Image (tube, rainbow, N blue to C red):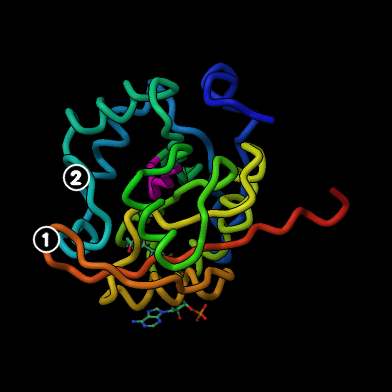
Amino acid sequence: MLTLAAVAEDPLVLTRRLNLKDGSDVVFRPLMHTDAERLAAFLEGLSAESRRLSTFDGYDLEAARKLCDAIARYDKLRLVLEDVLSGRIVGLVEFSLDLHPADIARYQEAGIHLTATDCRFGPTLSDDYQGRGVGTQIFPLIADVARHFGRTRIILFGGVLVDNPRAVRYYKKHGFQLVGSFTGSDGAQSFDMILDLHPLSGQ
Ligand SMILES: CC(C)(COP(=O)(O)OP(=O)(O)OC[C@H]1O[C@@H](n2cnc3c(N)ncnc32)[C@H](O)[C@@H]1OP(=O)(O)O)[C@@H](O)C(=O)NCCC(=O)NCCS
């Protein structure tokens, strides 16, 4: 089973290359310390609407450096999607291997007991990569990352805003089940959703 330290030491263990439907090649790989500037360009490029749907602590070089400094230091695993030709980061997928007490309590209310074999995840693509099926193409790789860490279920990191129909459709399409809804500290309504991961055939 992989650990965050093992991934930081050898990011190639989770590095996968993919040919997108438009013919371009992308690499899905762990975030690395050398990514700060390219990650800053990704964050800076996110539109106001993308920032509303997927919130980060900041959208500049300082924020990007913090994410790079956090590699293998906390419970988070961050992977990026990189366009091979340009070297541009066009997506960021965040995993949290620790559960938040508030999540545990909300899921418990819905009759779901979260355990150490569950994890949280949240995806964000650059505006120009959204709505083109790219999230769908990388979803099997996302599920594999969770499996490599011995996780059997994935919940949404912070839920998904009720008024984010594309993301809701995306999660449902990949097998996530609706658990319930909750109101965030900013008054916005979000859904909790959970996915049961099936072992890969042959495993
Ligand atoms: C959420 C996200 C990762 C999904 O990736 P994606 O590549 O855009 O998704 P896909 O194109 O693979 O799939 C989207 C699905 O939603 C559908 N869809 C698109 N717009 C929709 C809308 N307004 N209402 C309902 N469904 C919609 C698409 O048709 C597609 O379904 P289909 O394959 O059955 O036709 C990406 O859009 C993103 O980064 N969004 C901004 C940040 C965000 O919302 N992150 C999630 C936070 S919880």
Is 71 on the left-hand or right-hand side of 112? left
Quarter location, residue 197:
bottom right
Residue in the foreground of this view, choosing between 23 and 107: 107
Magenta: main secondary structure equals: strand
Determine if the magenta segment contains residue 66.
no
Label 2 crowd bin: few (<14), some (14–19), many (20+), radius 10 Å: some
Q: Report the span colored magenta.
A: 88-95
Residue in the foreground of this view, choosing between 155 and 11: 155
Numbered label attached to residue 44: 2
Whether disc 2's CB lies below 8 Å from ligand 1 is answered: no
The x, y position of residue 190, in whole percent, is 28, 68
**Which residue appears at 65% of the width and 47% of the height?**
144
In the rendered structure, which disc, 2 or 1, sits on the residue that comes first in sequence?
A: 2
Mark 2 touches mark 1? (CB < 8 Å): no
In the picture of the structure, the residue carrying the numbered disc 1 is 186
Quarter location, residue 153:
bottom right
